[in-house]
Image: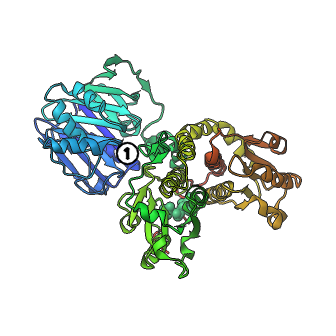
Amino acid sequence: MCGIIGYVGSDQVAPILTSGLKNLEYRGYDSAGVALADDVLSIHKREGTIDDLTVPESTATCGIGHTRWSTHGPPTDTNSHPHTDCTGEIAVVHNGIIDNYDALKADLEAAGHEFDSDTDTEVIPHLLEEALERYGLPTAVSRVVDRLEGSFALGVVAAGRDEIVAARNDSPLVVGHADDGAFIASDVTAFVEHTRDVSYLEDGDVAHLDGGDVRVYNDGQRVDRPIQTVDWGADAAEKGGYDHYMLKEIHEQPQALRQAISGRIDAVAGEADLELSLPEQYLASLDEIQIVACGTSYHAGLYAKRLLERHAEVRTTVKIASEYAFSPSRDPWRTLVIAVTQSGETADTLGAMRRASRAGAKTLAVTNTVGSTAAREADDALYIRAGPEIGVAATKTFASQVATLALLSVYVGRTRGTLSSSDASDLLEHLRGLPGAVQQVLDEEPRVRTVATEYADGDAFFFVGRRLGHPVALEGALKLKEISYDHAEGFAAGELKHGPLALVTGETPVFAILTDGTSPDETLNNVKEVESRSAPVVGVSSLERAEKFLDASFSVPELGLLEPLVANVYLQLIAYHVANSKGRAIDKPRNLAKSVTVE
Ligand code: AGP
């Protein structure tokens, strides 16, 4: 996920871009840049944070800016946006993923275009260079976006032109309307200090900002995008109107999941396209997969274990990274060690990955951070593409980790011949349905908040689940304890009667996962055990007959083995609203850090 800002009008553009990028820094901060459009185009971009970027004073009144969260190509000065064409007279900023950039780049190189960066974005200015030979800027942009596959929000400027053209497909883009000009941005936060009058572009829209005049087209027809006035100001800006980053990131999950699966699913063929360099023969010969991770990422690994063993028929063990050692009884040549780490910088996980590598095993980093230590040191890297996660409590990155690991289970299963194309298609179709299913849960937030408030004063909080419900129970407990500071514990549901049941009273709310993939019928027996000891029970259930044993219940859409993952979104919202009812420092809970870079 990246941040885009653009302005054209009567004011000097440089300070507008700089402050806009600062407001967008939460969307990406591994590199940044601006293009100032005057008689000539001046580009200023570099790796690093916004504060590292130097934008000179300029009389230009038109320009675009970008802050990057890398998905293709590590964070470097050259890979930073804006990107330009061969002439240096066209500049583009982009948020999203161009799925067909390989083919486009090959055609452009064959036609003599020279590329500087490793990014997918750079194909766009070169395509525009060709289109501008025949069309004006707005039509040229329309023609080019018709050739792009994938998700994108674009901003385009050209030398000697006092105009911006923007386009949107599956990545957010808004237009700001002011007396002295017009803005484009990834979200309102970038320019809300200048205007609160906003129109929201829709997929397929091409917006032409000519001074303060804004015209929007879709499929070649002029369309109307009504101007709305947002009711929050700059102070809430960075959180997009949410009270906390954590809540914003919980609500970003549909978009994050769309990015995780974008361009990676061929449901018809039953294939997952992950662009991994691990040789197919190596994957076919694997004897074991070992997953090393911490905290939430460890829970994602537990979820993935069941998918990998089911689809790839390869023994999979999941180890807490700080406890990991490569066993001499294992054959390193036939063992793949997967480090799951959203930050890519967790010291315990890096240590485990290095121990595996020293033992001779191949390593794969599944991470959210391009260019991170884990990504650079592993033999291969697989990105979850969730965009930056600011809240210390991991939310959208858990969902994106599991979705990406589910894709990996299909990829390895199909490579090993242990997963039929029809079975693969079923899971891939469920992955396609995941963003929408999560959105349905998010739409239930008012009722979830009511339930959370009702049970917020419990003595302790128990989370129980079986099979794929077990890692979700562990994750639900971790989420609640780390932001509410209340005691919360996750259990394999069958374990309750072997001891923890002694803790259960009428003041210990129990949250149970009873969806597909969790042996709900057996779990219901455990629900009855706690319900008969007067504990309030909240269930996420697809079991009709469980209702009478639940004090509150929520449902998830039919999504097979991904239902527990969808159920987890309820637990994220429960944790958030319990903690918020207690006034906790939700984004920065006491004693914790977002990335634990010490062992
Ligand atoms: C989860 O909410 C916590 N922030 C923590 O457990 C985290 O998952 C753990 O530190 C691992 O971080 P990583 O994914 O960046 O390696």
Crowdedness of circle 1 by 10 Å Cα count: few (<14), some, many (20+)?
many
Q: Nearer the viewer, residue 265 or 425?
A: 425
Residue 345: x percent and y percent?
Answer: 43, 66
Query: Which residue bears the numbered disc 1?
Result: 24
Q: Residue at x 32, y 21 (%)?
A: 217
Q: Nearer the viewer, residue 473 or 413?
A: 413
Which residue is farthest right?
Answer: 532
Structure colour scheme: rainbow
**As displayed, is residue 415 above or below residue 128?**
below
Q: Nearer the viewer, residue 233 or 23?
A: 23
Q: As drawn, is 260 to the left or to the right of 567?
A: left
Residue 430: x percent and y percent?
Answer: 57, 42
Q: Residue at x 47, y 59 (%)?
A: 342
Name which quarter of the figure residue 548 lies in: top right
Dot 1 amino acid type: Leu
Residue 558: x percent and y percent?
Answer: 65, 39
Q: How many marks?
A: 1
SS of the residue under disc 1: loop
Name which quarter of the figure residue 542 lies in: top right
Q: Nearer the viewer, residue 450 or 204?
A: 204
Q: Residue at x 21, y 41 (%)?
A: 107
Residue 307 in view here: yes
Which residue is farthest bottom?
Answer: 328
**As displayed, is residue 121 above or below residue 473?**
above
Residue 145: x percent and y percent?
Answer: 30, 32
Residue 391 in view here: no
Q: As drawn, is 524 to the left or to the right of 484?
A: right
